[in-house]
Amino acid sequence: MLKKSTILAVILAGSLLAPALASAEMKIGFVDTDRVFREAAPAVKAQKKLEKEFASREQELQKLAKQARDLQTKLEKDGVTLSENDRRNKERDLANLNREFQRQQREFREDLNLRRNEELAAVQEKANKVIASIAESEKYDLILQEAVYRSPRIDITDKVLKALATGN
């Protein structure tokens, strides 16, 4: 009997509290972080900065790749007419060139990823400040950056992008 009265009390309390909870409006927003990283002015600026910073190393890699291709082509073309010793030396040179290319390419990718992460962290920090500012000024209760589903009605990404573009 006690269990039945407890259940009845919970149902009664729930029915009394439901209208009060429903009348309490919550203002929720959503920010598409991927879009901020692609489209925000600081993100675009950071991408251009990285491209400029790594352009010379990328050109060196392309030059090294071309040397390896040219040596491979020459070896395939002239390999039959070369002496055994010359052919072996050229194959060794090609292997060394390929190893050097792979090493430099790996270092390039690691350095680029490290710098990209640094730049994106700075963009994220700026975006978070803008989001906090929007949340305070427009009285948001909750702003999410990750969601399985969100209604376009609560998406404030455009506001964030605009604020980042103006430097606010």
Image (cartoon, grey):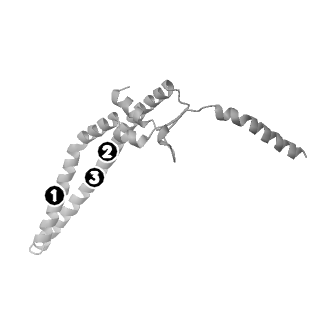
Nearer the camera: disc 2 or disc 3 = 2
Query: Is 91 or 46 nearer to us in this picture?
Result: 46
From the viewer's perspective, is residue 44 above or below residue 130?
A: below
> Residue 78 in the image: x percent, y percent?
10, 71
Left/right placement of residue 141 relative to residue 75 reads right
Query: Is 155 or 40 nearer to us in this picture?
Result: 155
From the viewer's perspective, is residue 82 above or below residue 158?
A: below
Whole-number angstrom distance, CA of label 2 to CA of label 3: 10 Å
Disc 2, SS: helix
Disc 1, SS: helix
Nearer the camera: disc 2 or disc 1 = 2
- Of the numbered discs in the image, which one, if any, rests on residue 92? none
Q: Amino acid at mark 2?
A: Leu
Residue 20's image quarter? Answer: top right
Whole-number angstrom distance, CA of label 1 to CA of label 3: 14 Å
Query: Which residue carries the number 2 mark?
Result: 112
Whole-number angstrom distance, CA of label 2 to CA of label 1: 23 Å
From the viewer's perspective, is residue 164 above or below residue 10?
A: above
| 1 and 3 marks in contact (CB < 8 Å) | no
Query: Which residue carries the number 3 mark?
Result: 105
- Of the numbered discs in the image, which one, if any, rests on residue 67? 1
Q: If you read the primary sequence from the N terminus, does the residue marked by circle 1 or circle 3 appear first?
A: 1
> Residue 11 in the image: x percent, y percent?
78, 42
Q: Amino acid at mark 1?
A: Gln
| 2 and 1 marks in contact (CB < 8 Å) | no
Q: Amino acid at mark 3?
A: Gln
